[in-house]
Structure formats: structure tokens, C-alpha cells
Image (cartoon, rainbow, N blue to C red):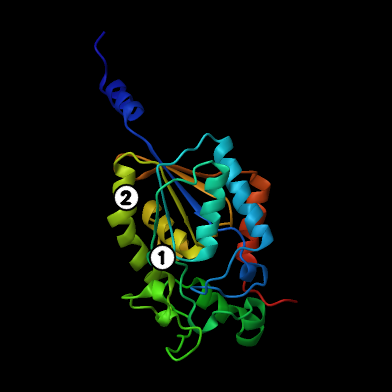
Amino acid sequence: MKSTGAEHYNSRLMSRPVSKLVLLRHGESDWNRENRFTGWTDVDLSAKGVEEARAAGRALKAGGYRFDLAFTSVLKRAIRTLWIALEELDQMWLPVEKSWRLNERHYGDLQGLNKAETAAKFGEEKVLLWRRSYDTPPPPLSKTDNRYEGRDPRYAGVAVPASECLKDTVGRVVPYWEAAIAPAVRAGRRVLVAAHGNSLRALVKHLDGTSDEAIVKENIPTGVPLVYELDERLKPLKRSYLGDADEIARRIAAVAAQGKAKA
């Protein structure tokens, strides 16, 4: 029997290669726990964050995930999350590439400030604008400030920003995706990216083609693997979080509630 055009098309869909890419936001940090703006400040994981990273690794192991290569930022909360997840997977030997381009968004002069107290002082609307506006950066950090990272040796040769909006973060993450991560995925390598809320939102925006208005409402929970299934053009076929749906919803709500003044 001669096959129809529809059958041929469906056969092509079923046979086309599918790549899986896993994105993992670091576990809760000490400053996440204290509800402080972190940005490029090199804060470590809290005890809860360590457990979130372990749970992420266990979820990946239970799902049968194995990796060939990992990418992360140069900030310890993301690096340690990756280490812990790979330990649970018994893949600590995995090649890892670190880049400042996967760092969290730079929060400028807000770094270290309590989000709720800042909202009480400046108003929730202003803080929400600084946190979630696509193209409005928070107040810049002076280069003479002790918090300024320009003297840190890990950023030698890097034009360290004084402040960033999400648009700025997209502007450094997407070129890194195109130059380093995407070629590995296209080559059939199984890739894990452990990074931060805003650097991962930049990737999500690029992969999903999310609008500037919609991406600011995207809340990525800490310590929960986000799995993408990509076609041969690296366009998403499907995306889903690994884990208990109720717990994931609770963590997403907690991220959304940050920056609100306490009653």
C-alpha cells in the first residue's frame, strides 16, 4: 500500500532526533533565606539549599538522567549545587565549563539589602520595577564601593557591570548559549546547566521565544530541574519540571512573593 503524505510526515516527526537539556537553578542561598538582593555577591548555599541540590540530583538519578557535559557560573552557590547534584548522580568526573556570563543578574546598589525592607522604604511598585522590569536596571553600584567586583581576579579582563536589567542579562547569556552550549547540544551531548534565576530566565526567553512582557512573570524555583526536549533546530518540543507538583508550585509562589513589604 502506498503511504500517504500525512503518514510520511508523521513518520518523519517520530524519527527526528530529540535532545534533552536540563536547567537547574541553584538551591536556596544564605541570602535567599534572608530575603536579600544577591546578584554577583558570592554567597554560599544555606543548609536548606544543600538539601534542595541533593534532592535535584536524586530526582535526576531516579529519572535515569546521565550527562556528558555541564555548564555553570563562577558563583559558588551555582557551582556547589552542580557539585552536589553530580555527586548524587555519581558523575563528579564530568567536564564542567564555568563562565561569568551565566552569573545572576547584577543588582547594583541593591546587593545585600533586604528585599522586604527595601520595598517598605521605596514601595513595592518601585522594587518590583527594579526586580522584574525587562529593561529598567536598579541603581548602579559605585566602582569605589567595597562591594564592587571589578577587583576580583575571576573577572580579570571583564567589563564588570555596575547594574543590570534582565535585558542586559539576556545580552550576555544568549551569545554564550550560541557559542558554547548550543553546539554541544547539537553534537548530541547531554548537557546540564546549573545557574541562577535570571540567567536561566534569559535562556528560557531565548528557547521559548517568550515576549519581554511575559518573561518578567516567569518564576524559576530553586533546586528543581527544568527539562527541555528540543528538536534538531533546538526548538522546544516540551518542557517540564522534575518533582512533586505541589512542592514545585509552593517554591514558585515563594519566588514570586519576594520583594513584598511585610505586613
- Amino acid of disc 2: Ala
Q: Residue at position x 57%, y 70% from top?
A: 43
Tell me how far mark 1 sits from mark 2, CA to CA.
22 Å
Point out residue 65 in the picture as x, y percentages from the top left corner: 50, 37
Point out residue 33 in the picture as x, y percentages from the top left corner: 67, 68
Point out residue 158 in the picture as x, y percentages from the top left corner: 33, 75
Res. 217 visible in picture: no
- Amino acid of disc 1: Asp
How many numbered markers are drawn?
Answer: 2
Callout 2: 10 Å neighbours few (<14), some, many (20+)? Answer: some
* 259 over 201 or under it: above or below: below
Image quadrant in which the N terminus is located: top left
Which of 126 and 72 lies nearest the eye of the viewer? 72
- The reply to whether discs 1 and 2 touch (Cβ–Cβ < 8 Å) is no
* 99 over 147 or under it: above or below: above
The residue that mark 2 highlights is 182
Kindly identify which numbered label has been placed on residue 191: none
SS at circle 2: helix
Q: Residue at position x 46%, y 83% from top?
A: 148
Q: Residue at position x 30%, y 43% from top?
A: 186
* 110 over 38 or under it: above or below: below
Point out residue 167 in the picture as x, y percentages from the top left corner: 39, 70
* 123 over 70 or under it: above or below: below
Q: Which residue is at the far bottom?
A: 144
Q: Residue at position x 55%, y 56% from top?
A: 81
The residue that mark 1 highlights is 212
Res. 63 visible in picture: yes
Callout 1: 10 Å neighbours few (<14), some, many (20+)? Answer: some
Q: Indicate which disc, 1 or 2, sits on the residue closer to the N terminus.
A: 2
Q: Quadrant of residue 175?
A: bottom left
Which of 209 and 44 lies nearest the eye of the viewer? 44
Q: Which residue is at the far top?
A: 1
